Image: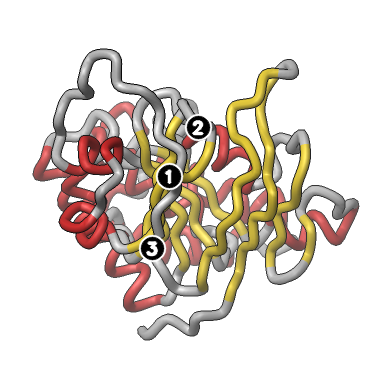
Amino acid sequence: MEQSHETVIEVRNLTAGYHGAVVLDRLNFDVQSGEVFVILGGSGCGKSTLLKHMIGLYPPMDGAVRFRGQDIVTSWGEERLAILRQFGVMYQQGALFGSMNVLDNVRLPLVEFTKLPDSATELIARMKLGLVGLAAFAEHMPEELSGGMKKRAAIARAMALDPSILFLDEPSAGLDPITSAELDRLVLHLSRDLGITFVIVTHELPSIFAIADRVIMLDKRTRGIIAEGDPARLRDESKHPWVHQFFHREAAAIGAGPGTEAES
């Protein structure tokens, strides 16, 4: 499925942090419909902080996050709920409820946020599990699943309400290379065949090159975006020392000072 190039998320002059300490300073970027958009950078640069602000989990210190023109920060009541229902989120550890089997974990958003009968919520949940290759594991408990299967189940639950955007926080964390590659293929299938937009936080280079249509790279020294664009082009053409070090897995020079310019 081709990307429509419609802007679905606009981040404008976003400043974010905790307890008065700024982590991200005046970020500006867009996410286009149907693309796999990756937020990358080194440890502590604010990747997960940015994702949490994009989904409305925390209010920013300043700036705006808009979904199809509607401000997530200032929306309220039914308007805000309508926006948030367009978002599906998979957190780093999957966050499945250990007391429920896989099917009931996926059904949970449908039970909580719709008035569908049990037969319908079960049918939808089984369909979502089929999309991620877990149809045969519906009655299993989370503890019986491998790490990669837990991630797939969490993605199925994130898709339960048919969101237009899926946010994945470090989906490959803790997975072996083969399982990680299988998860990458799933993301590409859901994006290309179903047209789902993805916003993914990761620092795993193989996954970045396998799935990303476009990336932004954050850096904790500038508290901002130091590069944006196609990851292969940034790897091969970037002159920014930090960008080069990241994509080529090179250690930083001792005493290297911070840079100032962002690339695109």
The answer to whether 256 appears left or right of 107 in the picture is left
Residue 33 spot, x, y in % from top left: 51, 73
Q: Quadrant of the N terminus?
A: bottom left
Task: Answer few, some or many: residues within 10 Å of disc 3's Cα (few below 14, many 20 plus, some between 14 and 19).
Answer: many
Dot placed on the residue nearer the N-terminal end, 2 or 3: 3
Residue 142: which quarter of the image?
A: top left
At 29% from the left and 32% from the top, the residue drawn is 173
Vertical side of 165 occupied by 108: above or below: above
Whether label 3 touches label 1, CB < 8 Å:
no
The answer to whether 256 appears left or right of 159 in the picture is left
Q: Closer to the camera: disc 3 or disc 1?
A: 1
Point out which mark residue 172 bears: none
Question: What is the distance, in whole Å, between disc 2 and disc 3 at their CAs?
Answer: 25 Å
Dot placed on the residue nearer the N-terminal end, 3 or 1: 3
Total marks placed: 3
Point out which mark residue 36 bears: 3
Q: Which residue is mark 1?
A: 226
Residue 42 spot, x, y in % from top left: 34, 30
Whether label 1 touches label 2, CB < 8 Å:
yes
Question: What is the distance, in whole Å, between disc 1 and disc 2 at their CAs?
Answer: 8 Å
Q: Amino acid at mark 2?
A: Thr
At 52% from the left and 39% from the top, the residue drawn is 224
Instruction: Name the element at disc 3.
Output: strand
Point out which mark residue 222 bears: 2
Q: Amino acid at mark 3?
A: Val
Report whether residue 177 is seen.
yes
The answer to whether 9 appears left or right of 201 in the picture is right
Residue 88: which quarter of the image?
A: bottom right
Task: Answer few, some or many: residues within 10 Å of disc 2's Cα (few below 14, many 20 plus, some between 14 and 19).
Answer: some
Q: Residue furthest right?
A: 77
